[in-house]
Image (cartoon, rainbow, N blue to C red):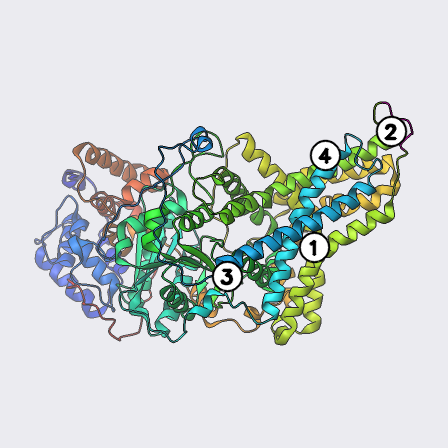
Amino acid sequence: MELSITAELNRRELRTDVIERYLDALGLTGVARAALVARMRARAQDGADAPALFVALHAAIADEDADSGNPSHASVVARVALAGEPHVLPDPPAKGRLPAAPPLARTSMAPLHWLRSWRARWRRSRDERRFVPDSPVERQDWRRVGLLRRTLLLTLIIGQTYIATDLMQAILPYHGRQPLEIPILILFAILFGWISAGFWTALAGYLLLGNGGDRWAISATASDEAPIPPDARTAIIMPIANEDVAGVFARVRATFESVVRTGCAERFDFFVLSDSANPDTRVAEVNAWFELCREIGFGHIFYRWRPNRIKRKSGNVADFCRRWGRRYRYMIVLDADSVMTGACITRLVQIAEANPDVGILQTAPKATGRDTLYGRAQQFATRVYGPLFTAGLHFWQLGESHYWGHNAIIRIAPFIRHCSLGRLPGTGNLSGEILSHDFVEAALMRRAGWKVWIVFDLPGSYEEMPPNLIDELKRDYRWCQGNLMNVRLALMKGLHPAHRVVFITGVMAYLSAPLWFLFLALATALLALHTLMVPDYFTEPYQLFPLWPEWRPDWALQLVGATAFLLFVPKVLATLLAMRGHARGYGGPRALWASLLFEMLLSMLLAPIRMLFHTRFVLRALTGLRLTWRSPPRDDAETTWSQATRNHGLQTLIGFVWTAFVAWLNPLFLGWVLPVAGALIVSIPLSVYTSRVALGQRARRAGVFVIPEEIHPPREIRAARRYRRIADPPRTFIDAAFDPYINALMCAMPNSRRHLPDAIRRERALLAQDAVTRGLVALTTEQKARLLGDPWTLSWVHSQLWQSDVAGAYVPIARERPTRTEDNGGIRLPAAA
């Protein structure tokens, strides 16, 4: 493209201080600045005007001739070298590009043996190729133990549910013989069975942890002193999309430095895989990556921005596997809020090396980092109760466990062969791209014969929780639709029964909400029926004797007490485990029990609110309403009163109407309704006040909801917070157009296209002219993205803007030069200045 501006420059009167302002933006002082000015004067003719001096300046920076139509393009590499001082960059960058990624090692990754249609799946078509597992021979005889444990679990759930349902039948006025009572009994059996499954899982976890662990634990199969072979290279990848940039790279740096302290850093590479569509976020990511590498050295942490953002996170991971999968044996997947210790990471590799039949090892992340009252309560709950339920899941599942999509290690070769995801056929919200990809990938890995284990007893894995109720419900919205989609996969050919159950339990996690709501609605309707209508004493044809309705509130209280026992005893057992030598980490015994009581009260208030939200989520997913998928917030965001009213207003109205209706029917039944309806009535202030950071900090000072990671924060958590606190202000698209260094970084990124067709080049020329004449703020997000992907056009815009009147209003952010001088193993680029 030829973007000649010579004629325009002759017509435009430029301010004589443009060169001085540009040198100020470069941050050059003293001898370096004087030497650059001298070289510029030597290249400029006597009496040269400001445009000619600007061309000579970039020619002096680049130490080569510069195009008068686009002088800043010639100096891109040299400006990158200046940005990297005093540390060194690899020499030379391939074709003028930054070393943002290692050499490609491409491989194919396509979905095989995938779904075709509902009809084909129901028919189990014979033309579908039979799937043959390709994993190594199992090294442990644990499958028989797993079958016995699952049989015991199923027996306990069915037996307990039968007894409770029988009691519920005796409580109902007509003992299940009235038409309205039959669906009530069915719903009660389903919901009680769901509660029973959670109770027995927690009890199994308590017995396992209380006895010092499980002999079948995967962590016991490898020595913590086993060396990692040189060919067992691992990629630690963090897929992100429009996240808090400073927080992301702070956590990456803290994890990287922890790996370095293990002495095995040469076995690991880090990748930040960006799907960010916001141009400002994209510029901030590139600058943050460069600044991080400028301090720790290039060649250890890589950055990739994906222009074609299909299949969300699973597509991002698949894109990495296709590009660099053959370079590594394992990959550890992190979320944007994840931090892992080097000891945890190396231990995962050791366990995977000792078990060649393992495809996925999932850690149990601990929640930390929140200051709001709601976030602190959830941190406490996951820290105290989480280990119990995770150990219980391990007890039942063993080598057919969950994969939660992050803080886990994956064997890349079988993942590439078997875990590529296709699209679900059909139309509507339950078709298309798979959202909850992690459950599906674990099921496909196990279908291929590779094992999936939870390393429930491995410390050093951390994540963050949503800061408030509304943000948690937004996350649940995404998870709800993803789990409902997965029910279509439960009949996939060749799946292990354990993973079919995983799909079903994922659905029940959200489907239980509308079932609970329907149960309460039917119970209220039953009350209205018996209050407003004359009792029916003859419910069956040719009935000789009347059937008198019976109300047994004492039996109902017993059933409610039994249900509460199943819900709350696991929490008490988890607290008893936390008391064993670790109570100081929770503020002491009194603070621990006080936190338990407050958390139980808060969970009782939040349960009805979540019930209505999850009911709405399920209905929206099933009725085909659109879903917006956004990244969750990573900071302590407080809920405003307007947000709470907008989100909880309908719930409050339902609570008032429900309470008034029951009071009108029979005030004696208000005690049964208020625990649910009352929570809905107070949902607005509850959502607002639990989101307050001040209340969370006050609770911490009082010792409530304290966790060990707050009293004695791990080194990696402290480092991540420190790096986040001292991070520079994020750079934006404006900086990419004006700042000499940021502009050079964006022009030197590997995913920028150097050669474009003539039609696209002409379109970019018009876009660049539009950006200069109308202003950068007038550009759309898509137009900004096109400029960021075209180094020639972006550098031309940079030249134009600096030679215009608007350049005087731009104030570049001062760059802090690192003071460290030790060599980082690279080679300095030849600097022109």
Which tag, 4 or 1, sits closer to the chain's start?
Answer: 4
Q: Nearer the viewer, mark 4 or mark 3?
A: 4
Residue at horizontal 53 percent and vertical 31 percent from the top: 625
Q: Secondary structure at mark 3?
A: loop
- Is disc 4 placed on a helix, strand or loop? helix
**Residue nearest the viewer, comparing 75 with 472:** 472
* Residue at mark 3: 365
Residue 264 position, x and y percent, is 32, 71
In magenta segment, residue 544: yes
Alpha-carbon span between mark 4 and mark 3: 40 Å
Q: Amino acid at mark 3?
A: Pro
Q: CA distance from mark 2 to mark 4?
A: 20 Å
Mark 3 to mark 2 CA distance (whole Å): 53 Å
* Residue bearing mark 4: 183
Residues in magenta, as a range: 542-547
The residue beneath circle 2 is 532
